Amino acid sequence: MPDLPPNRTETAFTDYKLPLSRGQAIVEANRCLFCADAPCIKACPTRIDIPQFIRKISTDNVKSSARTIFEANILGMSCARVCPVEVLCEGSCVYNLEDTPPIQIGKLQRYATDTAFENGWRFFEAGPESGKSVGLIGGGPASLAAAHELRRHGHRCTIYEKRPALGGLNATGVAPYKMRADKALEEVEWVLGIGGIEVQLNAGVGESISLADLESRHDAVFIGVGLGPDSMMGSPGEKLPGVLGAVDWIEQMKLQYLSLGNVQRCVVIGGGNTAIDAVREARGLGIASVTMIYRGTKASMSGYEHEWRSAQTDGAVAVWQALPIAFEGEGRLQRVRCICLDDHKQAIAGTEFSVEADLALLAIGQSRLGQSLAALAGIELDRGRIITDAGGFTGRKGWYAGGDCTNGGKEVVNAAAEGKAAACSIDQYLAGQTFAGQSLAGQSLGGVSLVGQAATNTNGSDHG
Ligand SMILES: Cc1cc2nc3c(=O)[nH]c(=O)nc-3n(C[C@H](O)[C@H](O)[C@H](O)COP(=O)(O)OP(=O)(O)OC[C@H]3O[C@@H](n4cnc5c(N)ncnc54)[C@H](O)[C@@H]3O)c2cc1C
Ligand code: SF4
């Protein structure tokens, strides 16, 4: 994997949640009631046996605790850092019913998984070679979880990633105060440590490799391409220097040194979690004035309330029920022209106003890549999202999918769960294929490619 520049901008951030020491972890673990019908397990998309891993921490059996976590979720280290635990496991802990702080499940998971990484513990081996091979398109959390599980079943895997590194948005998108890119790449190496996963970087399917090539090389295919580029608004002045997609800007900030120049006023457009992340990151980098502009009310925004509270604590402000209508400035952005909206999101005549800004980040969703697969017989789409059954089967023989490209944009833990579930389905399919002597070759490809087909879709979803 390529080295990241040491001076990249994200290194300005430190962990916003400090890790637990061994003593703190044991004390916290002993608070757990080890509920029989634990609601925290049901709230976890990967169904980690939370009371069991916590009980093992309480008896100082950290190695076995980590095994319990990784058995369910091989991306348990990053999920411990990036999961929105407030609305998942911790939000379901029974202690909430007693108005008592929930068990710090995320921090306990981090304690166990970090200890495993620090000690170089390995838990899994590849299964006996099955003679089958699976091609995985995209190298994000969904494909990584799928590939690891497929190796446990003995299938050879090749991940085709169009970028120069694996990790997907876990490396390029997650807020650096939760996890930096180098940590995400460390986890990639840990996953690949099972052996037998070939990686082809700078290998865009539809660019250097055609779908036909891919089908002829493999017995099954997993699609884990995530979402496409930031959706833009199409408003006047959007091409001015200083106007950028939020996911694009976050990626630059995480992977490179990003000079902020004289930026003192930043406007973030949107009300989802990407918008809130961008707001907190802009404030964290010292931009004095950061304003989030959202077309709906505070109550209707899709971003998590607890994240917005933190953004406010960081000093951000919001303008609710407003729509940017033009980006203005001489040679570069100087102000964003807006109009107020009513409760039906209709513009109210005569309410135009401007917000001074040197930087505007558009966080109104990401386009969806699924459209490019629509011509593949058997693959159905719903507004650019690939439709699958619960096991990730697309409807086309041997083709499976999972992660953001199927769920429309959720969390890393959802991608991990869906990748693993698809791998189990692929394993069953390959077992049947061995029996029936089926093959992928000979299916109609309909002449489609994955290149540059990001359907611009302003309904594209934010993570969460
Ligand atoms: C700004 C931002 C912040 C986020 N923060 C969090 C967070 O704090 N916590 C959390 O749990 N989730 C967060 N998420 C969501 C989370 O990152 C995603 O849900 C998760 O990464 C989805 O995994 P995936 O594998 O489906 O897709 P991705 O992570 O997007 O990976 C897809 C991969 O496929 C590659 N690819 C695409 N097309 C091709 C092709 N044709 N050929 C080859 N490769 C291709 C891409 O380059 C990419 O590497 C965030 C998302 C964003 C945008
Ligand atoms: S719900 Fe809370 S107390 Fe019960 S097992 Fe889960 S973490 Fe422990």
Image (tube, helix red, strand yellow):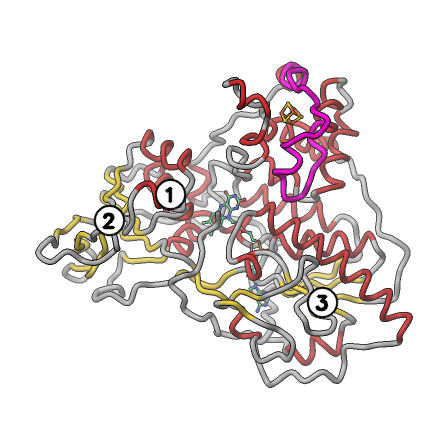
Q: Earlier in the sequence, mark 2 or mark 1?
A: 1
Q: Within 10 Å of the Cα at label 1, are there few (<14), some (14-19), or many (20+) other Cα atoms?
A: many
User: For the residues marked 1 and 3, what is the alpha-carbon distance in whole angstroms?
Assistant: 35 Å
Above or below: residue 360 compared with residue 441: above
Rendered image: mark on residue 276: 1
Distance in Å between CA atoms under marks 2 and 1: 16 Å
Kindly report which numbered mark, 2 or 3, lies closer to the viewer in this rendering: 2
Secondary structure, mark 3, is strand
Instruction: Tell me the kind of residue under disc 2.
Output: Gln
- Ligand 1 within 8 Å of disc 1? The answer is no
Residue name at image x 11 percent, y 58 percent: 349
Residue nearest the viewer, comparing 27 with 284: 27
- Please state the quadrant of the image where ligand 2 appears: top right
Badge number at residue 135:
3
Q: Is residue 177 left or right of residue 279?
A: right
For the residues bearing labels 1 and 3, Cβ distance under 8 angstroms: no
Is tag 2's residue or tag 3's residue first in the polypeptide sequence? Answer: 3
- Range shown magenta: 25-51
Mark 2 or 1: in front is 2
The residue tagged 2 is 321
Estimate how packed mark 2 is, as few (under 14), some (14 to 19) or many (20 or more) residues with alpha carbons within 10 Å: many
- Residue reaching furthest left? 350
Residue 46 inside the magenta-drawn segment: yes
User: Marks 2 and 3, Cα distance to the nearest angstrom?
Assistant: 45 Å
457 versus 107 height, above or below: below
Is 64 displayed left or right of 231 in the figure? Answer: right
For the residue marked with disc 1, what is the amino acid?
A: Ile
Q: Secondary structure at mark 1?
A: helix
